[in-house]
Image: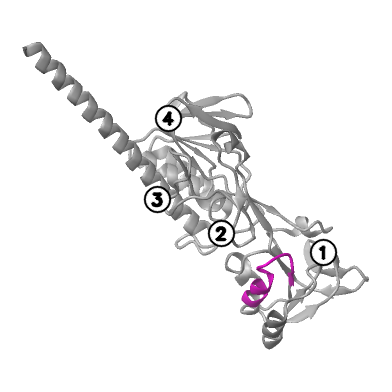
Amino acid sequence: MTDRLRDEYDAVVIGGGAAGLSGALSLARSRRSVAVIDAGAPRNAPAEGVHGLLGREGIAPEELVERGRAEVRGYGGHVVTGEVASAARDGGGFRVRLTDGREARARRLLVATGLSDELPDLPGLRDRWGRDVLHCPYCHGWEVRDRAIGVLATGPVSVHQALLFRQLSEDVVFFAHTAGGPAAEQAEELAARGIRVVPGEVAAVEAEDGRLTGVRLADGTLVRREALAVASRMVARAKFLADLGLHPVEHPSGVGEYIPADATGRTDVPGVWAAGNVTELSAQVAPAAAAGLGAGAQINADLVAEETRQAVAARREALSREGGERR
């Protein structure tokens, strides 16, 4: 089911994952007209299940989205399939244009488009992403417990990642790849935890019968592994915000680019909120949903404040006219 996009809404939510749908639910339950515009390309699509979500542990990503869409629609919200091309100021609100030419006006925007994972350009790696090529021990670690795990050095968090996966298996190796090996203190930590450092550049990730079998080094050596942890470079999906002056910036931790927002989700552009991975790169589904819910409540409160100011101004004007007529 695809809802028809109306001309005007109190709020348009761009992105229909956990953050976006939770924000829309909060707004719809506050009797706000709201539309969720979703391109249908969730980051967690390759994963078999969502983990760490209390009451819905292991639920398939597509089932969680469908449940969320049904709940939003149950309170009168619209869920529209489409990709946003641009968002621009339009009077006191915003004009959102989709790639297919459709448009809608919104008084407020909630950006919940998530992020894209930029991965090392290694043969076989992208094909296994979200299955046995992983990034998060809390999202996927239990599923690879006690297996032979490799960690590919890609950036500043790779050693930390190796130490976290060591909690799940005694057989963890660290592939230095092109990073040049860990610093002395980090090397000591890895050695103390029994994590072997494998020098040399990685050439490919190999699989057989739909399963990861190992990591092939540039010198031809095959290191047998059943799972590979890779810290991707995470980049917010937010190019469509350029006309509003909102651009992804480098995250302080050096792991990617994000849209800065305060604790309530409010961005530097008045009337625009952000929630989920677009602003919190490391958020799992549960905190992303919580952030969306909170941002939706903040947007409703902001609209209430605006409507109250307008009502007070209208009342004063009416009383002033009344007084003038009496004179």
The residues colored magenta run 151-164
The three-letter code of the residue at mark 2 reads Val
* Of marks 2 and 4, the one in the foreground: 4
* Of marks 1 and 3, the one in the foreground: 3
| Picture coordinates of residue 60, whole percent (x, y) | 57, 55
**Of callouts 4 and 1, which one flags the residue occurring earlier in the amino acid sequence?**
4
> Where is mark 2, residue-wise?
50
In the picture, the quarter occupied by the C terminus is top left
> Where is mark 4, residue-wise?
9
* Of marks 3 and 2, the one in the foreground: 3
| Tag 4 secondary structure | strand
| Picture coordinates of residue 122, whole percent (x, y) | 82, 59
Real-space Cα distance between discs 3 and 2? 21 Å
The furthest residue to the right: 219
Label drawn at residue 294: 3
Report the residue at 81% width, 62% height from top: 209
Report the residue at 48% width, 44% height from top: 268
Determine crowd level at label 3: few under 14, some 14-19, many 20+ residues with C-alpha closer than 10 A.
many
| Tag 1 secondary structure | strand
The three-letter code of the residue at mark 3 reads Gly
Q: Quadrant of residue 130?
A: bottom right
**Of callouts 2 and 4, which one flags the residue occurring earlier in the amino acid sequence?**
4
The three-letter code of the residue at mark 1 reads Ala
